Image: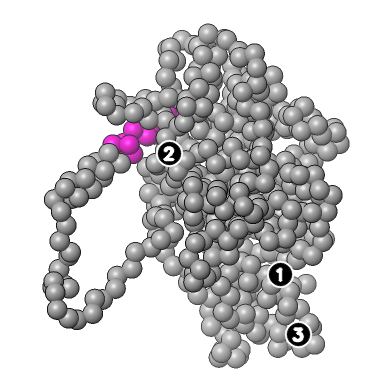
């Protein structure tokens, strides 16, 4: 449950049928589990994408990795440690040259970086269900998870999620009490060489300096760097820009809300840009990218806007990051700002500016934006690029944003991409975690504690099963709970009609 007292509510669809793949175009090779999210808290969605889920509008899906034709691995970039590659620097210089002098590159340098195809999710399953539990007033929902009339073994309240730790790597250090015996005093720290201590302190100072270079303004300003220190991403973004450039580029962040005046004022222009992009870049027919499709995929979000004392100033939720060139929108990045990351949902842009490599440029701006938010919310330190699809050469560009990790599809541990590539060269599907003994730390252990919403009442599945004797849905509920994990199963409400 979110801090504001609201639950996430989902309907699970399973995933037995194959659908058309948006990557290799196989007619029925795309397999995924799916659920319709009527409403969702940002923490629940953060936990879900850390288990391989991803949203398209309000439809949340998880590829069946060992069955689908093109396995899709969740990828995240360590924003604070990111350094632009030579290709990234060329892209930033190309855009700045255009802004300064109006010089437009002749050739397209961003081929294959168009982003996720919209048909990577099967169309049939993204239609909203006939019933809408979201219309239920949360104040009217009765919570009997701790009701005295329910069985003591099944009436336990959902486990309170652990406080979000600072996003370190998947390998967590644990405090282990040393065994008594001969040798050094176990109550004192291990002896370390002075050289190692000096090296660690120097690295800490360099990291601190890098963090201080992040600007707090929407258009990051360059920071002073020493002659022997490489330029920061923020410096490359604004490098060579005069005070009076020929073209003016403004980046605006607007919440995805029809109650927001800035979002409403730019809605028609944004929808028209989306249609033009889809028809030109992806070859969609006009009926496939109309206003209703735009609204359903890129404006309808299940995420509830939230604020937190330790969160970013803009809050959490779904946003459009709009790129305004000389007073008109030329590109829009659809983003979710979550407790631990900025998650890229989609990008669309004006085809006339394709030679500027706006796909790469926007990703670099979004990484810089993540670094900016991290100054306000320390645990928000990652930039999620969606799915990395090694079997599709056009989608491998996401692996160029280093350092980055891929999510192991079996243990849900993060593995550096350098260690993953050799395995994926051998097989399109791989258990990326090299530790053969490792398992899913949040695996389902008690189905009875999973929460369901039935007739406006929140209850554990064990209580629901007793009320609905003879209803054989245990396998379906168990499959759902296994996929979302024990923690989410005890927080998210599975809607039962």
Distance between the Cα atoms at labels 2 and 1?
41 Å
Which of pointers 2 and 1 indicates the residue nearer the eye?
Answer: 2
Q: Earlier in the sequence, mark 1 or mark 3?
A: 3
For residue 314: magenta? Answer: no
Residue at (74%, 39%) from the top-left corner? 294
Q: Residues within 10 Å of mark 2 (few under 14, many from 20)?
A: some
Nearest the eye: 322 or 472: 472
| 30 to the left or right of 302 | right
Q: Residues within 10 Å of mark 3 (few under 14, many from 20)?
A: few
Distance between the Cα atoms at labels 3 and 2?
53 Å
Q: Is residue 369 above or below residue 33?
A: above
Q: Provide residue 364's location: percent of width, then percent of height.
A: 51, 33
Nearest the eye: 149 or 430: 430
Instruction: Work out which residue is located at the far front of the displayed protein and give it.
Output: 426
| 149 to the left or right of 217 | right
Residue bearing the label numbered 2: 82
For residue 210: magenta? Answer: yes
Distance between the Cα atoms at labels 1 and 3?
14 Å
Give me the disc on residue 495: 1
- Helix, strand or loop at label 1? It is strand
Q: Which residues are magenta?
A: 209-220
Magenta segment main secondary structure: loop
Q: Provide residue 357's location: percent of width, then percent of height.
A: 60, 25
Residue bearing the label numbered 3: 468
Nearest the eye: 78 or 222: 78
């Amino acid at each position: 449950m979110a801090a504001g007292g609201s639950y996430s509510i989902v309907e699970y669809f399973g995933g037995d049928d194959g659908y058309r793949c948006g990557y290799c175009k196989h007619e029925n090779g795309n397999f995924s589990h799916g659920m319709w999210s009527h409403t969702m808290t940002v923490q629940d969605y953060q936990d879900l994408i850390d288990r391989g889920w991803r949203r398209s509008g309000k439809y949340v899906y998880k590829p069946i990795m060992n069955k689908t034709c093109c396995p899709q691995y969740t990828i995240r970039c360590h924003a604070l440690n990111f350094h632009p590659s030579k290709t990234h620097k060329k892209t930033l210089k190309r855009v700045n040259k255009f802004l300064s002098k109006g010089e437009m590159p002749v050739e397209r340098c961003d081929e294959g970086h168009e982003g996720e195809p919209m048909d990577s999710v099967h169309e049939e399953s993204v239609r909203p269900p006939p019933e809408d539990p979201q219309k239920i007033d949360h104040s009217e929902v009765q919570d009997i998870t701790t009701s005295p009339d329910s069985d003591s073994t099944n009436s336990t309240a959902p486990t309170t999620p652990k406080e979000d730790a600072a996003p370190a790597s998947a390998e967590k250090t644990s405090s282990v009490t040393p065994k008594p015996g001969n040798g050094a005093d176990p109550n004192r720290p291990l002896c370390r060489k002075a050289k190692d201590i000096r090296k660690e302190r120097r690295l800490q100072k360099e990291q601190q300096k890098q963090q201080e270079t992040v600007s707090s303004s929407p258009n990051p300003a360059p920071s002073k760097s020493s002659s022997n220190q490489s330029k920061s991403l923020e410096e490359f973004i604004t490098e060579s820009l005069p005070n009076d450039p020929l073209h003016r580029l403004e980046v605006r962040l607007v919440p995805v809300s029809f109650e927001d005046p800035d979002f409403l004022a730019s809605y028609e222009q944004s929808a028209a840009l989306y249609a033009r992009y889809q028809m030109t870049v992806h070859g969609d027919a006009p009926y496939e990218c109309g206003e209703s499709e735009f609204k359903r995929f890129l404006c309808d979000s299940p995420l509830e806007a939230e604020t937190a004392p330790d969160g970013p100033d803009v809050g959490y939720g779904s946003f459009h990051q709009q790129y305004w060139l000389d007073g008109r929108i030329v590109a829009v990045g659809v983003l979710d700002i979550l407790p631990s990351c900025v998650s890229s949902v989609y990008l669309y842009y004006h085809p006339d500016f394709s030679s500027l490599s706006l796909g790469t440029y926007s990703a670099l701006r979004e990484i810089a934006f993540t670094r900016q938010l991290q100054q306000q919310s320390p645990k928000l330190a990652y930039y999620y690029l969606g799915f990395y699809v090694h079997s599709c050469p056009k989608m491998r560009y996401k692996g160029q944003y280093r350092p980055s990790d891929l999510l192991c599809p079996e243990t849900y541990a993060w593995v550096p991409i350098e260690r993953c590539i050799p395995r994926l060269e051998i097989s399109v599907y791989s258990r990326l975690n090299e530790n053969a003994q490792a398992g899913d730390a949040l695996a389902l252990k008690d189905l009875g504690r999973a929460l369901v919403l039935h007739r406006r009442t929140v209850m554990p599945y064990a209580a629901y099963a007793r009320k609905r004797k003879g209803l054989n849905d245990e396998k379906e509920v168990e499959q759902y709970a296994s996929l979302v994990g024990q923690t989410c199963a005890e927080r998210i409400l599975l809607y039962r009609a």
